[in-house]
Amino acid sequence: MAYSHLLRLAGEQRGYFTTRQAAERGLSRRALLHRAQIGELEHAAHGLWRFSMWPADPNDELYALQTLAPFGTFSHETALSLLGLGDLIPSEIHMTIPESSRLAPRPGLRLHRSRLGAERERMLRDGLWISTPIRALTDAARAGADPDQMQAAAKEAKGRGLLRSSDIERLRADPLFAGAL
């Protein structure tokens, strides 16, 4: 029964689950290791597991991070890329987390800490928490992303109806975006 509960949870997390989540459902670390030895599970990272039968996805790295940090929000250039805005190809994953988070930085992951706002200006898309288009645009611009790319992404967001009128006014108040919208 505990295994089926874990399988259900992992299904919501694209096949991933944490050691803690397994323990909360009555599965010990020893049971996880046994299931890994017989090929049912893969040990993905410290404290992170994945059901072997789950199909691979191009965003597996993001789903793994989301499982480890469900309070985090993919932001900045990563959010713009996930939204299909602009031609940005982020060189690292950007994630905004609460200031109180203990998530540690690692190669390829750029953490941004936020006192407030990130958890209110996010949306769930394909199982990932990502910044809203307005938040992603303003965060990426503030972090120094290419101005031409930011203007193009803003135009595209407006054209696709991803920005509310209040968002457009907010962007127009920024000199970077003023002429683009």
Image (cartoon, helix red, strand yellow):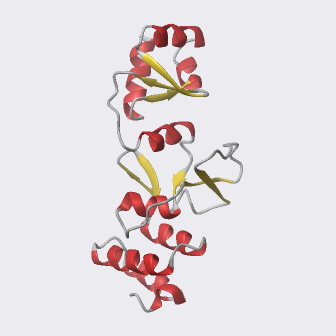
Placement of 105 over or under 148, stated as above or below? above
- Residue sitting at x 59%, y 74%: 142
Left or right of 178, for residue 117: right
Residue 131 shows in this picture: no
Q: Quadrant of the N terminus?
A: top left
Residue 91 shows in this picture: yes
Residue 131 position within the rendered picture, expressed as x and y whole percent measured from the top left: 48, 60
Placement of 111 over or under 70, stated as above or below? below
Q: Between 90 and 7, which is closer to the camera in this rendering?
A: 90
Residue 115 position within the rendered picture, expressed as x and y whole percent measured from the top left: 68, 60
- Residue sitting at x 51%, y 37%: 67
Q: Quadrant of the C terminus?
A: bottom left
Task: Name, please, the residue furthest toward the left.
Answer: 160
Left or right of 166, for residue 26: right
Residue 68 position within the rendered picture, expressed as x and y whole percent measured from the top left: 56, 37
- Residue sitting at x 43%, y 66%: 88
Residue 112 position within the rendered picture, expressed as x and y whole percent measured from the top left: 64, 58
Task: Name, please, the residue furthest toward the bottom.
Answer: 179
Placement of 42 over or under 170, stated as above or below? above
Q: Between 148 and 5, which is closer to the camera in this rendering?
A: 148
Disc tally is 0
Left or right of 172, for residue 126: left
